[in-house]
Image (cartoon, rainbow, N blue to C red):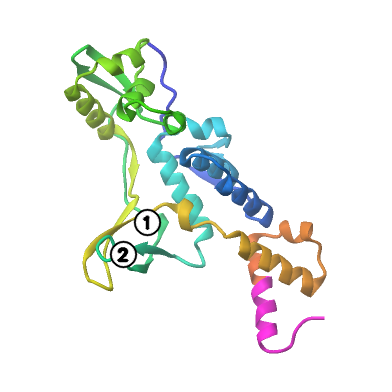
Amino acid sequence: MRSPETLAVAFPSSVPARLTGRLELQLQSILSARLTRPERVTGVLDCVFDYVGGTAATPELIRRLATGAREWLLQRAGGLFLRDRGWFEASCQECGQSFDLPLSLADAPRSPAGRGYPTAQIETSLGLRTFEVPNGLHEEKLARSEGGDPSRQLLGLCGLSDHAFQEALQFSAVDVEQIDAGLDAIAPDVASELNTQCPSCQANTSAVIDPLEFSFPEPASLIRETHAIASAYGWEEATIMTLPSQRRRQYANLIAADMRRGRGMR
């Protein structure tokens, strides 16, 4: 039987990197690349955090975090860039109308890991078998796989038996349900869906919270702010890119305010 790869930490501590234009450019490169969602999550977390769980952040470390732990860290990462906004756009599932929702990623409900995490022993038709909670490695491999039953492929990836992939094909439908339930019972989780009411049709609806879709800066805003500061102060792009993101926005806002008052800059 192989050893589990999933780290035994449910909601790891984190230390963010210094937020600058340079970091935002790196984020934009990751988010615009032709990557699967799990690969984007790995890249974003590696970019945004210097330390995770008291250890220097690396793609290898982040891939070994459980799926729930990765989503929790992704919400923490998104929250670093949402301090000035706190809103995101949702769409009603009934009428399709778009509307804005207030959002605090830091307050998203979460459920702790269960006993025995990150592994669970589950009685199957093939006997007692041990599985690890899915992690980033499993997510990335599953997202890149072509064909086959995703649920059984995941069981093959998470099974700690020396013959996990062969056994995944032999499990009964009842086995699959029991294994899924057993892993869900011990896996840490964070809410990724918000229940609300549509302001247009008043229907009860829900919205998926995916920080990758709305929380990180748009390329156009960085370009506009850089152009404004360079034009006003004559600073080089490299200098502006090393400014803390919040200070860069403050400079750009001051320049915009002066322009509105007709003062301009020399």
Q: Which residue is identified by label 1?
A: 107
Tell me if residue 259 is in the magenta stretch. yes
Residue contact between numbered discs 1 and 2, judged by CB atoms under 8 Å: no
Q: Quadrant of the C terminus?
A: bottom right
Q: Amino acid at mark 1?
A: Asp
Residue 170's place in the image compared with 52, above or below, is above
> How many C-alpha atoms fall within 10 Å of the one at disc 2: few (<14), some, or many (≥20)?
few
Relative placement, left or right, of 259 versus 145 is right
Single out the mark in the foreground, 1 or 2.
2
Q: Where in the figure is residue 121, as x and y percent of width and height?
A: 26, 20
Q: Earlier in the sequence, mark 1 or mark 2?
A: 2
Residue found 67% across the figure and 68% down from its top = 224
Would you say the magenta stretch is mainly helix, strand or loop?
helix
Q: Where in the figure is residue 228, as x and y percent of width and height?
A: 72, 72
Tell me if residue 87 is in the magenta stretch. no
Q: Which quarter of the picture shows residue 232?
A: bottom right
Q: Which quarter of the picture shows residue 149?
A: top left
Relative placement, left or right, of 194 versus 18 is left
Residue found 32% across the figure and 22% down from its top = 131
Q: Where in the figure is residue 33, as x and y percent of width and height?
A: 58, 44
Q: Which quarter of the picture shows residue 102?
A: bottom left
> How many C-alpha atoms fall within 10 Å of the one at disc 1: few (<14), some, or many (≥20)?
few
Q: Amino acid at mark 2?
A: Gly
Specify the segment rendered in magenta: 251-266
Residue found 55% across the figure and 30% down from its top = 60
On residue 96, the disc is 2
Q: Which of 226 and 48 lies nearest the eye of the viewer?
A: 226
Q: Where in the figure is residue 104, as x and y percent of width and height?
A: 40, 60
On residue 176, the disc is none
Q: Quadrant of the N terminus?
A: top left
Q: Which element carries disc 1, helix, strand or loop?
A: helix
